[in-house]
Image (tube, rainbow, N blue to C red):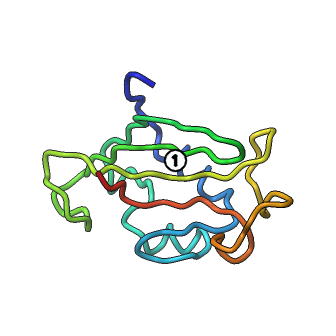
Amino acid sequence: MSASTLIDPDTLAQRLRQQSRINDPLCGDVSPQEVQQRSPLWPSAARWSAIRLIAVTEQGSRRLEEYLYHPATADCEVPIHPDSGLPVAVMFAQQADGAPLLGPPAGRDTRCDPPGGSAARAGPRRR
């Protein structure tokens, strides 16, 4: 992906709600509803003036989407410079048809997976 794509926060939020669990860096491994209520990383138009998809990497059943969140106000609950964006990466696990993966693929080592199978894993991207 050479250029960033402006993303509708509601569309991203809907995709996150379809996951069985989300491993959020602030909330831990919880339901999407809990992340929506508690995490400043939830894609809310009230909190983020723009969310841009900047890169996508797919391998097997996993899809890593890298975003740049731009705060709507200087007080966005996340320690970032007001004139810059916050890099956030989300790992989606999916079936071959693109549907959310509700359990681990057969034969895959699941020791590092959250309880209940796969999930989206969101967090600030470290550079």
Q: Nearer the viewer, residue 34 or 21?
A: 21
Residue type indicated by callout 1: Asp
Instruction: Please state the total of marks drawn on the protein image.
Output: 1
Residue in view at x 80 percent, y 41 percent: 96
Residue in view at x 40 percent, y 22 percent: 2
Left or right: residue 51 versus residue 114 is left
Q: Nearer the viewer, residue 109 or 118?
A: 109
Left or right: residue 111 versus residue 9 is right
Q: Nearer the viewer, residue 103 or 21?
A: 103
Residue 111, quarter of picture: bottom right
Task: Provide the residue designation for mark 1.
Answer: 10
Q: Nearer the viewer, residue 9 or 56?
A: 56
Label 1 sits on a secondary structure element that is helix
Q: Position of residue 40 (x, y in %)?
A: 36, 66
Residue in view at x 43 percent, y 70 percent: 25
Q: Position of residue 21 (x, y in %)?
A: 64, 68
Quadrant (top left/top right/bottom left/bottom right) for the N terminus: top left
Please say if 113 is above or below 89. below
Crowd tier of the residue under label 1, counting other residues whose Cα lies within 10 Å: few below 14, some 14–19, many 20 or above: few
Q: Position of residue 57 (x, y in %)?
A: 54, 38
Left or right: residue 75 versus residue 68 is left
